[in-house]
Amino acid sequence: MMKYLPDRFSCMIVAMLILATILPIHGQAASIFNTLTNCAIALLFFLHGAKLSREAIYAGITHWRLHLTIFAATFILFPILGLALKPILEPMLGHQLYLGILYLCLLPSTVQSSIAFTSIAQGNVPAALCSASASNILGMFITPCLVGLFLVTGSSSQSSFSFSAVLNIIGLLLVPFVLGQICSKKIRPILQRQPARIKMVDQGSILMVVYAAFSEAVIEGVWTQVSADQLILLVIICIVLLFVAMLLIYFSSKKLGFNRADQITILFCGSKKTLASGVPMAKILFAGHAFGLIILPLMLFHQIQLITCGILASRFAQQAEKNTNQQQS
């Protein structure tokens, strides 16, 4: 049962929410902290670029059917689900929380956890590495465009999406990633010897963003705007959204004739939504809006997907081990 419980990082995110609720940062301290947070985010994406070898990036590129299926799940299926649920969810949750649901539907896949769960479940790891990385990089362009298309058109009160927002995202996320790739050969051996420190930067930058975002949200009265009933309802909606998406993705991959390893890869890469890129992008795209309310669904969905995928990966691994033992006997 212990392996099904939330991991340490998930508990630390909850701790940041509690800390921001009790001791929110504000004023000049908040301004300085936001600058430090941006530096941490840039460092995070620099390290992501440095850790990925070019061979790993090129590996699996030719498996175009698998990649197209994952991209379709990430950038077509999820947005369709988010838009289709608007008549039901917006009256139930309110406008800002519904925007948060729709925003998470427009985000790219995760990188590290998608690959990790695919590896545990004995899926196609090289293809997962290629597809998840490409999804995250392309998502820097696709997600802002989708936000501009679905969250801005016809409503001046929604996100202040602009070309400058795309430039800010490129500067904060993509440029450090490219610089990391340029320095990859020299830096990767050093990074491989410092996994604990890399993990600290990786998780620490997200915790900083979460703390800053919810400090601002608490000052704006987020907990007075979200009732206990709404919070419970939001959790249920995130669970149902993930469940429906996973069912559609998994059975579609079977119908398309993919083998078991590819089905696992498509399931884990196509159903995940990134917190690491999603929160920094939301910080730029929704500047001046109820930022805390908009990212609340994403943070809940993130925890739910980690727990769910952890359980599924373990079961896939057990099934693979059982099949191997049967073949050997």
Image (spheres, helix red, strand yellow):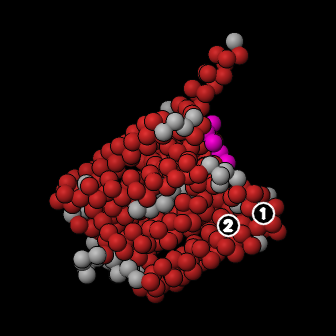
Indicate the amino acid at tag 2: Gly
Q: Position of residue 62 (x, y in %)?
A: 65, 52
Q: Position of residue 309 (x, y in %)?
A: 50, 42
How much space separates mark 2 and mark 1, taking CA atoms?
10 Å
Q: Position of residue 320 (x, y in %)?
A: 61, 27
Q: Is residue 125 magenta?
A: yes
> Taking 212 as reference, is 236 above or below it?
above
The image quarter in which residue 38 lies: bottom right
Asked if residue 94 can be seen in this view, the reply is yes
- Label of residue 188 in the image: 1
The residue segment tinted magenta is 122-126
Local secondary structure at mark 2: helix
Q: Which residue is mark 2?
A: 49
Which residue is at 76% across, 67% downward? 184
Magenta span: chief secondary structure: loop
Indicate the amino acid at tag 1: Arg
Which residue is at 53% across, 31% downward? 315
Q: Is residue 135 magenta?
A: no
Drawn side of residue 248 relative to residue 199, left or right: left
Depth order, front residue of 117/39: 117
The image quarter in which residue 154 lies: bottom left
Depth order, front residue of 150/289: 150
Drawn side of residue 96 relative to residue 13, left or right: left
The image quarter in which residue 323 lies: top right
Query: Which residue in the rendered view is the most extreme toward the bottom?
Result: 28
Asked if residue 3 can be seen in this view, the reply is no
> Taking 282 as reference, is 194 above or below it?
above
